[in-house]
Image (cartoon, rainbow, N blue to C red):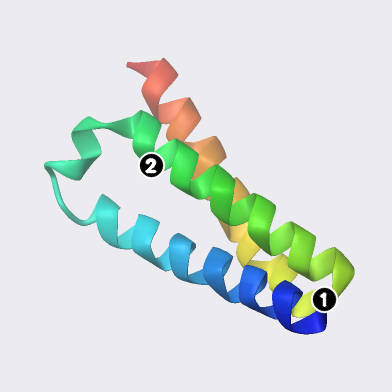
Amino acid sequence: MRSAWTHSGWTGTLLLVGTLAELAFPAARRHPVLIFVSASASMLLCVSAGISHKRWFLVPSVLALVLAVCLTVSVFSE
């Protein structure tokens, strides 16, 4: 069971890195909903792994939360 939580945490971390890479491309920035969903999924995966298995997976979840909040603020401020 522990390896499932580890895989969940690493998947969330890689999804966060992929989300940050998406933000580097102007074409991907036209779809903020996809980026928001990716950041939210990353946050959920990392939080579940951080609470259940390794506490350091909570760090990427906080980064994903900050990214989702910043994206939400930027979308609604336009």
Q: Which residue is mark 2?
A: 35
Residue 6: percent from left, percent from top: 70, 79
* Relative horizontal placement of residue 17, taking residue 59 as reference (left or right): left
Residue drawn at (13%, 45%), measured in percent from left and top?
A: 26
Residue 54: percent from left, percent from top: 81, 79
Q: Quadrant of residue 58?
A: bottom right
* Relative horizontal placement of residue 58, taking residue 24 as reference (left or right): right
Give the structural element (helix, strand or loop) at label 2. helix
Q: Residues within 10 Å of mark 1 (few under 14, many from 20)?
A: few
Residue drawn at (76%, 68%), measured in percent from left and top?
A: 49
- Nearer-the-camera pick, 43 or 62: 43
* Relative horizontal placement of residue 29, taking residue 55 as reference (left or right): left
Q: Residues within 10 Å of mark 2 (few under 14, many from 20)?
A: many
Using the image, determine if residue 70 lies above or below residue 75.
below
- Nearer-the-camera pick, 67 or 7: 7
Which quadrant holds the C terminus?
top left
Q: Earlier in the sequence, mark 1 or mark 2?
A: 2
Residue 52: percent from left, percent from top: 87, 69
Using the image, determine if residue 20 lies above or below residue 5.
above
Residue drawn at (56%, 64%), measured in percent from left and top?
A: 12
Q: Which residue is mark 1?
A: 55
Residue drawn at (40%, 29%), measured in percent from left and top?
A: 74
